[in-house]
Amino acid sequence: MTKGRMESVEVFTSEGKGRGLKAQKEFLPGDVIFAEPAYAAVVFDSLTHVICHTCFKRQERLHRCGQCKFAYYCDRTCQRAAWLNHKNECSAIKKHGKAPTENIRLAARIMWKIEREGSGLGEGCLVSIDDLQNHVDSLGEEEKKELRADVESFLEFWPPQSQQFGMQYISHIFGVISCNGFTLSDQRGLQAVGVGIFPNLCQANHDCWPNCTVIFNNGNHEAVRSMFHTQMRIELRALSKISPGDELTVSYVDFLNVSEERRKQLKKQYYFDCTCEHCKKHIKDDLMLAVKEGESKPSAETVKEVIQFSKDTLEKINKARMEGLYHEVVKLCRECLKKQEPVLGDTNIYLLRILSVASEVLSYLQMFEEAADYAKRMVDGYLKIYHPNNAQLGMAVMRAGVTHWHAGLIEAGHGLICKAYAILLITHGPSHPITKDLEVMRVQTEMELRMFQQNEYMYYKMREAALKNQKIQVMPEPSNEASPSLFHKKE
Ligand SMILES: [Zn+2]
Ligand SMILES: [Zn+2]
Ligand SMILES: [Zn+2]
């Protein structure tokens, strides 16, 4: 690769929309358009001791850096790989007495990289760090205050023997972080664990119905890690067929919201008005607000009432969930479903949101049969709303499959796991840890299904014995986070 160029894509500038990415050749669903290692990345403050600072995997036992006693790593390999980026940070933390917050650490890592390599275009880079957007001019008073505080903390942390930068440049870097910081997740995709800067990726514009997706891959421990493709990286992957010259787009927000709400969110977090086809024509809004059809069609008044009740309940649910009161969550969900069922259509997003929480929490409580019933209805709704190759859809189908499997519904469970596997092959790729987990489950459920078809009685006997001997695998605790935004933003 040469500087400022890539074979697969190019940067273009259009009036009104600014910069964007354009395909230089044809891509098919699942193709990796490009992979990009982080320019700089850090673990969130609250997780610095449970997540590896090199590969961002969650691990049971991590090794602590003996020097600063702040950084943690899976093993020697991860520690060695980190040294180039950690060396300066390590001695600065020792000198400072404690580690600064994530924003300051990320800015410092960027600055040390600039000190080493300069701020110009590096290998395989389409834009330089100097050229990234910062939105400093459109900040509100409150945000400007935060920026000034960040710059001050940075100056306190930054060692005098390192290259010195002007105030304006430091502000630019903090601006870059706040509008381009990409959310990194752990290897199971369950939790947002850090933030990184990927200059090429952030050239991709938003579309609510995009032709690409971006996925974070924590890399592979077993493979030789000196090879580029085994390092932690993001991948821009094609979701549909793309022709040379087509603009490459990703979605910055979850599609499961009516166009008006998505546009509000995009304006607030990313400072632009979405003009995509789906927003302009309000495509799928009708499905997301669907009302029961037929003779007993509810009045507009009743619909309004139920929607308000759903919104209030979702707030209560969030609160109960945060406090770990899962039985209370289940009670609230059941009550809400009773109100919703005679009024809202099967694809109504307020119904789907309750079904999603209910199935997740009931699985955690090991009430798998009721959970499976809700999960099935949720997936049926999602399939009508989401793009067929949507990562969120794939993950939801996977959860539903596992729930069915645990409920002993092996046929439906295997079917859902196969469906999820097909989606994740495109959105995550075959080497992603989640796809690999799914592959194992696919083989296991296929074997169980064959056993079930040959001898149902024996299957249940064996299942019973297996359940007695070994506690059924507990589902992960439901997370309190809403599905994370693509880019790391304050709400
Ligand atoms: Zn690691
Ligand atoms: Zn250290
Ligand atoms: Zn849109």
Image: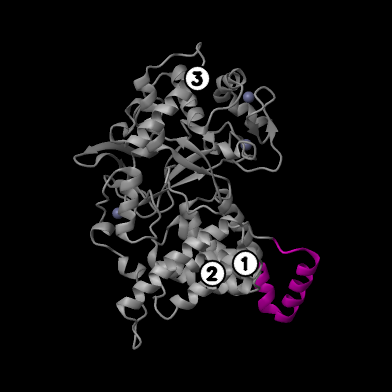
Please tell me which of labels 1 and 3 falls first in the chain: 3
**Can you tell me whether the CB of the residue at mark 3 lies under 8 Å from the nearest atom of ligand 2?**
no
Q: Which quadrant does ligand 3 occupy?
A: bottom left
Tell me the amino acid under the disc marked 3: Glu
Question: Residues under labels 1 and 3: Cα distance?
Answer: 47 Å
Which circle marks residue 350 in the picture? none
Res. 74 visible in picture = yes
Report the front residue among 260 and 394: 260
Which circle marks residue 327 in the picture? 1
Q: Secondary structure at mark 3?
A: helix
Q: Secondary structure at mark 1?
A: helix
Tell me the amino acid under the disc marked 2: Leu
Quadrant of the rendered structure where residue 468 is?
Answer: bottom right
Is 19 displayed left or right of 364 in the figure?
left
Quadrant of the rendered structure where residue 144 is?
Answer: top left
Tell me the amino acid under the disc marked 1: His
Res. 208 visible in picture = no
Q: Is residue 104 above or below residue 270?
A: above
Q: Is residue 60 above or below residue 81?
A: below
Residue on which the image places disc 3: 156
Residue on which the image places disc 2: 332
The stretch drawn in magenta includes residue 469: yes
Residue 75, x across and y down, in percent: 68, 33
**Can you tell me whether the CB of the residue at mark 1 lies under 8 Å from the nearest atom of ligand 1?**
no
Extent of the magenta region: 447-473
Going 36% across and 67% down the picture, which residue do you hit? 288
Residue 484, x across and y down, in percent: 47, 49
Instruction: Give the class, few, some or many, for how many residues have Cα within 10 Å of label 3's Cα (few <14, many ≥20).
Output: few
Going 18% across and 40% down the picture, which residue do you hit? 15
Going 63% across and 29% down the picture, which residue do you hit? 70
Residue 374, x across and y down, in percent: 53, 72
Question: Residues under labels 1 and 2: Cα distance?
Answer: 9 Å
